[in-house]
Image (cartoon, coloured by chain):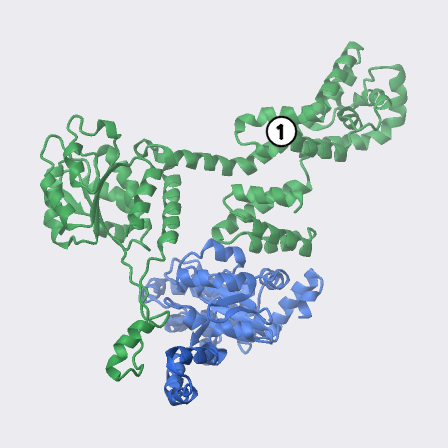
Amino acid sequence: MTVIDKEPLSAIEEIQSRFEKSGYICDRHIATSIYLSQKLDKPILVEGPPGVGKTELAKATADLMDADLIRLQCYEGLDESKALYEWKYGKQLLYTQILKEKLGDLLEDAVGLEASMDKLHTFGDHFFSEKFLETRPLLKALQSEKQCVLLIDEIDKSDHEFEAYLLEILSDYQITVPEIGTIKARTKPIVFLTSNNSREMGDALKRRCLHLYIPFPDAERERQIIKARVPEIDESLRNQLVEFVQQLRTQDLKKLPAVSETIDWARTLMLLHAENLDTELVRNTLNMLLKFEDDIDSMDPEVPKMVAAARKVNR
Amino acid sequence: MNRPLAEFVDMLRYSNVPVSIGEAVDAARTIDLIGYSDKALLKSALSQVMAKTTDEMVNFDQCFDEFFSINTELDLGEDLENNLQEEENIDPAEQVSESLNALDENSSPSGAPMGGGAGGGSGDTDQSGTGNGSTSAENDGSLLSMLERADRTALTLSMTQAADAVGLSNIVLSTQRGLFTRRIVEEMGLSEVTREISNRRKADDETGAEELDRRLGILFDAVRDMVERQLALTSAGKSLEFRQDFLKKVSLSNIEHRDFKVMRDMVRKMAKRLTDMNSRVKKVKNRGHLDIRKTMRRNVAYDGLLFETHWKQKEKDRPKVYAVCDVSGSVAAVARFLLLFLYSMNEVLPNVRSFAFSGTLGEVTDLFDRYGPEQAVPEAIERFGGRSTDYGRAMEDFRDLVMNEIDNRTTVIFLGDGRSNGTDPRVDILREIKNKSKRVIWLNPERKNIWGSGDSEMNRITPNCTVAEVCNSLNKLELVIRNLLKTN
């Protein structure tokens, strides 16, 4: 936690440089957001097109803070029994069966139903104790002694109910389980929520979070990212391929190539021992960048022109 | 929370960035942390705290730039600054001799005009005036002395204070510009200055009076600038608010073409709100809590061993809506917004089928699927509109098309004025539809007191509907759809 205790400016710079060392290249905006979330105790809602490193940011932060990463992948139909806790019904049922005889023994001396009931009541609620509680990511994050990073991935895929359910944990770092009571966080987790904007998040949730939008990186940043992620690649090829991808992003495509795709493509080109981009090579590997047949078809005639433009970068 | 931040929050709210109190408090804490010194950093930090969508981010950027550019070179228009600067530069150089001269001669015809347009020829003859004035009112902080001393800092401060005093931030309309400018200068002490000018004129100190007048003119320009900028900040948001309030109430058929865009946004916003309110109406199955009672009952067969679990289930149907719209003439405008509304809500109303008619009736659902509501409506109007309305024919067509698909979960919405040009509206079919469906809603853009007049068949139609209502404004439309969702 030493990083964020410094003066704001140097802290933000330090976050940025430490991220860089761990291979996550980011601009000051992102580093500011990490700093603020720590200082204001707020979760970060990260938005942006797929593949710009939203999830990576959480991982990098876990690295930076030396914290465990607890990840909760959201999907339609996710509810508290999958996200927070669940009773181990099977175990409960099994134990009642096994303990059936035991119960008989215990209740032997009680006469009549009422006396048996009274006696039963003295045993306490063993079946609804923590031993029968299956912890799920959210509860795990709250119970963890060590600092942890809680990543709630693709929150936009979950239902409105679940979003509302999260509000308590997001604002107060606590959660209420009816049978047990309120569970407060032992160590406040660093919370990231990511969203691809497949639906708009509720105002209540947005109000509780910092909002960080990560766009596609510019050419300079993307070159840095490729350098960090695929260090083996030759500089001229790196410049060319980044330029090519940047050009692709200006086109009208169903799905624009993201950073992760650029990295994959760079690795592919490395495997193929390419030294320069050429039309044939790009055509053959275009499916690394574009994930729709329509996109590939529509870009095919443009390839020679774009390759030529990309190759100019080095001159 | 300090005052600039409060003003900034106000400004954001006017520019469609709804900053909540909590967010404003966060912003204050952020400023405490980061300070004002690094503006880029402050912007990036505040944007994360206050703007929560990408649209808001754009507005935020704009507001931030405008707001903070104003605060730094606060309200001293370039002209004034430059002019006064020049004067100040001149002052010390000539001060001694000039002020001495000024004692014996009132008009010193000294040289080159300066200070651009505002001052004109009377340029630096002013020193005489300055000398006269400043002897009497050196440092008493009145507008007169500030003008005489050309004290930019004091003037700026006084301007802002005066602006606060007259409530400049409440300016809404461009017609208020003059009023506010005058009020601010008055607040700063205009009367004293004008009195001084006329005194000088009387005392034959023509140059002194002119110079003071000139400086006053520069001040007016600067204040006008400030007012102008404030107006730009607040009015855009506020006047849109006014307009939207108005548009919600105004009759849909009277809405002008240029307002369609605003209307679309409003419809979308309303639809979103309704969607949010109703999206919990969803199917819940095989998740949630164990249904003990059902589990026990189901496991009786296994000798009471709880073998098969059963989960609590909730099922709630989404309404099935058939919208039948008259797209002739005046009704078309209402139809446009009804359809837009219905289709904007596809999250909670996924089963909308729409039909359009004037003479004949046809289904336009596929148009909506293909083009989206914005293009589809004009397309539908093009395809089916423009003929003389025949309700009987439309009913028959509707019966032939979908009668056997209507079940007791279907809501049929008719939108039309019920004016059938003398033809039989075939209310028998309408009755049949009512019997088969969950309900029939008839929306009529006409006022209720002219229902049944002329060729209007509303008196025959109304008994065969579950409800028949007037629907001619966006507010009414929202009400209808709200009810539609509530009773499902």
Q: Which chain is blue?
A: A
Task: State whether residue B32 is above or below residue B441.
Answer: below
Q: State whether residue A100 is above or below residue A286.
A: below
Q: Depth check: A265 or B159 in front?
A: B159
Q: Residue at x 45, y 60 (%)?
A: A164
Three-letter amino acid code at the position of disc 1: Arg
Which colour represents chain B? green
Camera-side residue: A163 or B154? A163
Q: Is residue A137 above or below residue B467?
A: below
Q: Quadrant of residue B5?
A: top right
Displayed quadrant of residue B467? top left
Task: Give residue B407's position: percent from left, percent from top.
Answer: 17, 54
Image check: B361 left or right of B470?
left
Up/down of B410 relative to B378, above or below: below
Q: Where does residue A30 sit, x and y in percent of width and height? A: 58, 62
Q: Relative to the observer, which residue lies in front, A31 or B453?
A: B453
Residue B82 appears in view: no
Image location (x, y in percent) of residue B257: 34, 35
Residue B83 shown left or right of residue B232 in the figure? right
Looking at the image, residue B32 sits to the left or right of residue A236; the answer is right
Report the quarter where the N terminus of chain A lies. Answer: bottom right
Residue B2 can be seen in this image: yes
Q: Chain of mark 1?
A: B
Q: Secondary structure at mark 1?
A: helix
Question: Which image quarter is the C terminus of chain A in?
Answer: bottom right
Image location of residue B465, percent across then percent down = 18, 41
Tell me the residue that label 1 is attached to. Answer: B224
A16 to the left or right of B331: right
